[in-house]
């Protein structure tokens, strides 16, 4: 087996990340949703409890402005509503219409992910997570060198 070079690794990693993004983009479009609206609904649907806009912002790799725009659109179209929580917290909840949309757009995506997960052997699942965690840990550690250098203007 030929030794994997950094160039080959990064090219293939970027290609696979793009291909994965394209799958979700196609699912969003198929459901008539923007990418941002899809991911907001996905975040609400997969959260273990009540979700705030801040929670969604911390989960998604989207700008605050993009998330805000998607939330406004979903609220205006009657798919989500804001409910009061303790203090100034506002929780996002699916309306009946939003539940219907999530069942049509998000539940099938989650089912695809579940079947994909089940397509991996148990040891493959654990290995994939372990390698992703290790790669992220190393990436964070190595990137600290960049963050400690003064930014040129």
Image (spheres, rainbow, N blue to C red):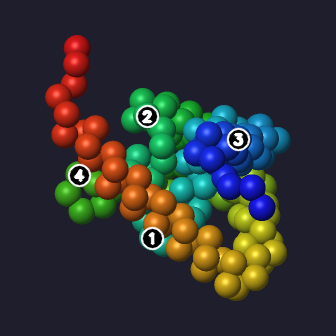
Cα–Cα span, label 3 and label 4: 42 Å
- Local crowd at mark 3 within 10 Å, few (<14), some, or many (≥20)? few
The reply to whether dot 2 and dot 3 touch (C-beta < 8 Å) is no
The reply to whether dot 4 and dot 2 touch (C-beta < 8 Å) is no
Can the viewer see residue 72 in this picture?
Answer: no
Residue 132: horizontal and vertical position, in percent? 53, 64
Task: Give the residue at x 41% y 46%.
Answer: 57
Cα–Cα span, label 4 and label 1: 18 Å
The reply to whether dot 3 and dot 1 touch (C-beta < 8 Å) is no
Cα–Cα span, label 4 and label 2: 22 Å
Q: Which residue is mark 4?
A: 88
Residue 64: horizontal and vertical position, in percent? 40, 35
- Local crowd at mark 4 within 10 Å, few (<14), some, or many (≥20)? few
Q: Quadrant of the C terminus?
A: top left
Q: Considering the numbered disc 4 on the image, is that residue within a helix, a strand or a loop?
A: loop
User: Residue lying furthest front in this view?
Assistant: 2
Cα–Cα span, label 2 and label 3: 23 Å
Query: Disc 2 or 3, which lies upstream in sequence?
Result: 3
Q: Nearer the viewer, residue 38 or 121?
A: 121
Q: Nearer the viewer, mark 3 or mark 1?
A: 3
Q: Which residue is mark 2?
A: 63
Cα–Cα span, label 1 and label 2: 23 Å
Residue 108: horizontal and vertical position, in percent? 79, 61
Residue 35: horizontal and vertical position, in percent? 64, 38
Q: Which residue is mark 3?
A: 15
Q: Considering the numbered disc 3 on the image, is that residue within a helix, a strand or a loop?
A: helix
Query: Disc 4 or 1, which lies upstream in sequence?
Result: 1
User: Residue lying furthest bottom in this view?
Assistant: 122
- Local crowd at mark 1 within 10 Å, few (<14), some, or many (≥20)? few
Q: Which residue is mark 1?
A: 49
- Local crowd at mark 2 within 10 Å, few (<14), some, or many (≥20)? few
**Residue 137 higher or lower than 21, as above or below:** below
């Amino acid at each position: 087996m030929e030794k994997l070079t950094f160039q080959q690794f990064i090219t293939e990693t970027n290609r696979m990340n793009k291909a994965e993004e394209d799958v979700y983009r196609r699912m969003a479009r198929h459901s008539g949703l923007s990418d941002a609206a899809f991911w907001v609904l996905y975040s609400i649907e997969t959260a273990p409890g009540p979700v705030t806009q801040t929670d969604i912002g911390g989960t998604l790799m989207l700008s605050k402005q993009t998330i805000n725009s998607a939330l406004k659109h979903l609220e205006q179209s009657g798919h989500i509503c804001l409910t009061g929580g303790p203090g100034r917290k506002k929780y996002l909840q699916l309306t009946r219409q939003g539940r219907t949309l999530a069942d049509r757009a998000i539940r099938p995506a989650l089912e695809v992910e579940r079947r994909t997960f089940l397509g991996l052997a148990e040891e493959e699942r654990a290995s994939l997570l372990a390698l992703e965690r290790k790669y992220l840990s190393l990436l964070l550690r190595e990137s600290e060198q960049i963050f400690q250098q003064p930014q040129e203007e």
